[in-house]
Amino acid sequence: MGKFTVLNHPLIQHKLTIIRDKSTGTKVFREVANEIAELMVYEITRDLPLQDVEIETPMGKTVQKQLAGKKLAVVPILRAGLGMVDGVLELIPAAKVGHIGMYRDEKTLEPHEYFVKMPPDIDQRILFIVDPMLATGGSANMAIDALKKRGAKSMRLVVLVAAPEGVEAVQKAHPDVDIYAAALDDRLTETGYITPGLGDAGDRLFGTK
Ligand code: PRP
Ligand code: URA
């Protein structure tokens, strides 16, 4: 089964409280969501492989570490995933960005795929799939299916708020994908919203209703 990790660093918890607050407007929501994504990526990349490299400092030659060849990509699940991309790129600016468009039918909660554009070599990359909300898990599961179909082999799912139902659904369907969340919330409401959650992440990021 894939690992599920809550990254509950104090800074992450503090910033998450800011975006949960319904009085937080679009501008601050966007800034802080990216800041949380950046902090999460710092934690999630702890196990990236390193290799030795010889360089010359002003004092002479030395062998030091650099990231080994493994290439990275960030894959936002549109729309709301876009709200985490800049934060990820702050720390790994050379990462490629793939996009996957997914919306949830408001009544049935079934996900629908509408767009996929990936870097050509996703089979050789570690993909960080980002989406603020993991609710039923339908969208994440469909996104992971779509990526596997295109050759992806190494994926990590990075969400701000997870519901237990969504974590279970992804672990069941994709035991090879580790999940990282800034918080694990109580449950889903009857209408499929995470509670206490933060509301509709896409609407709060982009000022829509
Ligand atoms: C939200 C969210 C996830 C999905 C989570 O997107 O960003 O993608 O719902 O729900 P699930 O786990 O039950 O599938 P939404 O469909 O509202 O689209 P948006 O990002 O365009 O607002
Ligand atoms: N999508 C959201 O944006 N919020 C939720 O609480 C659940 C799904």
Image: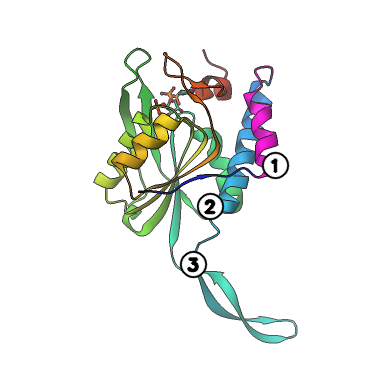
User: Looking at the picture, which amino acid does disc 1 mark?
Assistant: Leu
User: Looking at the picture, which amino acid does disc 2 mark?
Assistant: Ile
Q: Front-most of 203 and 154?
A: 154
Residue in the picture at 50% in, 34% down: 82
The span shown in magenta is 9-23
Q: Front-most of 181 and 34?
A: 181
Q: Front-most of 131 and 192?
A: 192
Q: Secondary structure at mark 3?
A: loop
Q: Is residue 200 left or right of residue 31?
A: left
Q: Secondary structure at mark 2?
A: helix
Q: Secondary structure at mark 1?
A: helix
Residue in the picture at 53% in, 24% down: 201
The reply to whether dot 1 and dot 3 touch (C-beta < 8 Å) is no
Does 17 sit above or below residue 200? below
In the drawing, what numbered circle is on residue 175? none
In the drawing, what numbered circle is on residue 11? 1
| Residue 8 is covered by the magenta coloring | no
- Mark 1 against mark 3, which lies toward the viewer? 1
Disc 2: CA contacts within 10 A as few (<14), some (14-19) or many (>=20):
some
Disc 1: CA contacts within 10 A as few (<14), some (14-19) or many (>=20):
few
Query: Magenta span: helix, strand or loop, mainly?
Result: helix
Instruction: Check mark 1 vs ligand 2: CB closer than 8 Å? yes or no.
Output: no
Q: Position of residue 169 (x, y in %)?
A: 34, 34
The reply to whether dot 3 and dot 2 touch (C-beta < 8 Å) is no
Chain-order first, disc 3 or disc 2? 2
Q: Is residue 6 left or right of residue 149?
A: right
Q: Is residue 102 left or right of residue 61?
A: left
Residue beneath label 3, please? Answer: 49
| Residue 15 is covered by the magenta coloring | yes
Q: Is residue 4 left or right of residue 154?
A: right
Residue in the picture at 38% in, 31% down: 137
Residue beneath label 2, please? Answer: 44
